Amino acid sequence: MVKIEEISSTATFAWSHDNIPLLVTGTIAGAVDIDFNSTSTCQIWDVFSKKKGGKPDVSCTVENKFYKLAWSKPFEGRKRGVIAGAFENGSIEFWDADILINTKDLEKASIHKSSKHTGPVRALQFNPNQSHILVSGGSKGELYIWDAKTFSEPTVPGHAMTPMDDISSVAWNNSVSHIFASTSNGYTSIWDLKSKREVLHLSYSGNGAKSNFSCVAWHPSQSTKLVTASDSDNSPLILTWDLRNANAPEKILEGHSKGVLSLDWCKQDPELLISSGKDNSTILWNPISGIKLGEYPTTANWAFHTRFAPAVPDVFATSSFDGKIIVQSLQDTAEAAAPTAPSNDEEFWSEISSKETQKPKFHVHQAPKWLKNTSSVSFAFGSKLVVVRSDNPGKSVVTVNKTKIGSSIASKDNLTK
Amino acid sequence: MVTVANAHDDLIHDAVLDYYGKVLATCSSDKTIKVFDTDGTDSYKLIETLTGHEGPVWQVSWAHPKFGSILASCSYDGKVFIWKESPENRHWSMIAEHAVHSASVNSISWAPHELGAVLLCGSSDGKVSVIDFREDGTTTHVAFPAHEIGVNSVSWAPVTHSNNAKDTSGNTMSQRRFVTGGSDNLVKIWHFEPSSNTYVEEATLEGHTDWVRDVAWTPSVLVKSYIASASQDRSVLIWSQDNSGKWKSTPLKDERFSDVVWRCSWSHSGNVLAVSSGDNKISLWKEDLHGKWESAGDVEQ
């Protein structure tokens, strides 16, 4: 594991969409510190800057603790996006990220505050295609759609098939912007904002145990596919579905020994999914083949939230109730690397104390899609040009072309034959 | 055009001809490297399949023939292997392994031969390493952080034969200069600083809005020195230094490419740039008399 940063805080978080992403963290509701410190803070971390020595860029004290944070992509008038926070008292607040980073003042950055929800809000997500649209899920089945441009009265998505209880997660479809999913009562609901109703209702029972769906995520590009996971300890399953047949799941991913609390499907590579749960573990999967790819070092308590950095999927973060947010790289080959022999005693002891005791276990090394260039070109002696092009899926063709570039006169003619 | 058919069982990521333009090396997601010989004809015959990497092999690079028939390869497994062909039986074997990186090694490049047998590597662990293969058979390396999140590409500057090409000790270290491109959207220029005995960052070039996928420094000193950088943002920028030494960029074309630009390569004379993109298009570009870049055609499929 290449651990990038460890933040000491029992907090939820959201990534910014920058290429060098920032992390916003907020003290999680429903947990207390070892010292029973009840203050709640909202902080912004530049985890890739080594110069700051583990200090946040922005740190503000807030009255209430958080259940969830979300950070939108930039949109008109909000060049670094909008941060939305859901507090334990049910209020939702929106901040301009650029103003917050520059002024380090939550008050000045605040652009809207609402107590529309009547109870705790545990689920928030900005729409991936319409960056200013947010869905929030609260207690008693309350779901609201917000417009962070106008802040007009939030709308409800329509009628539910069955009465709902607390909403534990929400997820927008990545390609059809008026579809989203939510989990409540152990069911997964699919909503269509155009027809203003719940259009599908997923449940699963297998091996005598009912799955209690607690989190949901959509396929990065195929609109009918989603993954949902159960937080019940006697059925800690992750299920992939193709909604064209909503009667049964496509794949069942078994590997967590206790309930699953969080999921994220990689936007850049549909063959990568991370999950974390009550068994304190974070697991990397290939949800298409259904194979468990690897496990990251376990935390000392429930790992309740895990997310890829949206613009840098090589990196992800997991927060746990043992008071840590760990930011680490997805890839690691360090275990394969030859150990370097310490040259003296001092080096040995400094190395042994700084070394992680746990290492991630990779069962299958699967290169992420974003590293796989599909074409290549290289010139050689005699103005030859070697070209690689992808052909059928998973196949490439190599050609050696003779170019006429030896003549130094620029010409518009096609230089190859 | 000659097609090398059915070379690998999976995607091929790189294919390069040797110094004389005769022997072809390819590498693939199938974890192997293949070596083909033309045998004086127009067809390529497989002479060897090199196995040992435990992940996709991203790039291969031929050393200058004065060091022997030597190929370097880099892989997702975090390793760099050096392969050598025995002149007697044409049998290939691995002669060195470098596991100095802790993540995928995405790019490798041999230095201009005047600088010795020196290999430059860039990795997803954010570091660049420079490996020196000395004449007495020993190797040394240095590794240092270059780009946050990951290095995607490395390329050497050509050696200029000016008066200071060699210092009094005949050492060419001060001639070492290269360019790197990374997932921080940046292009960086580095050189060896004899006074501190380290590689130092000489310039950081900002211009891309997404990952820099490839960088290529013109290999010849006969033409003006340029660096081409290809990016996930679907653009290629051509960088050059003005009289004050400041780096300026010109876009290769005004509009964006229709897909991600994966790789770019200069002709040996340094005046034509070939560009490959995710939509399988290969285009050639040339500078006109007014310093503007114009299309010199596409390489047909």
Image (tube, grey):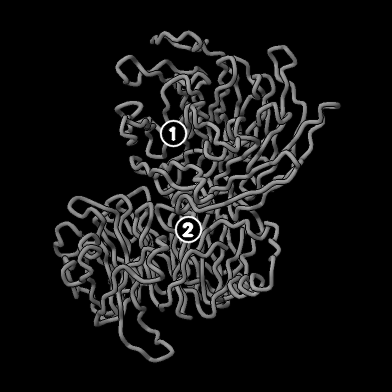
- Which residue appears at 33% of the width and 33% of the height? B249
Left-right relation of B133 to A381: right
Identify which residue, A16 or B236, lies in the foreground: B236
Q: Residue furthest right?
A: B89
Asked where in the image residue A171 lies, by quadrant, the reply is: bottom left
In the rendered structure, are the residues bearing label 1 and label 2 in contact, judged by CB atoms less than 8 Å apart? no
Q: Name the residue under label 1.
A: B261
Identify which residue, A355 or A82, lies in the foreground: A355
The answer for which chain carries disc 2 is: A
Q: Is residue A147 above or below residue B237?
A: below
Asked where in the image residue B94 lies, by quadrant, the reply is: top right
In the rendered image, the quadrant that contains the N terminus of chain B is top right
Q: Name the residue under label 2.
A: A315
For label 2, the crowd category at 10 Å Cα-Cα, with few meaning under 14, some 14 to 19 and many 20 or more, is many
Q: Position of residue B25 (x, y in %)?
A: 67, 29
Q: What element carries label 1?
A: strand
- Which residue appears at 56% of the width and 76% of the height? A279
Q: What element carries label 2?
A: strand
Q: In this view, does A293 lie above or below B274?
A: below
Q: Position of residue B8 (x, y in %)?
A: 67, 33
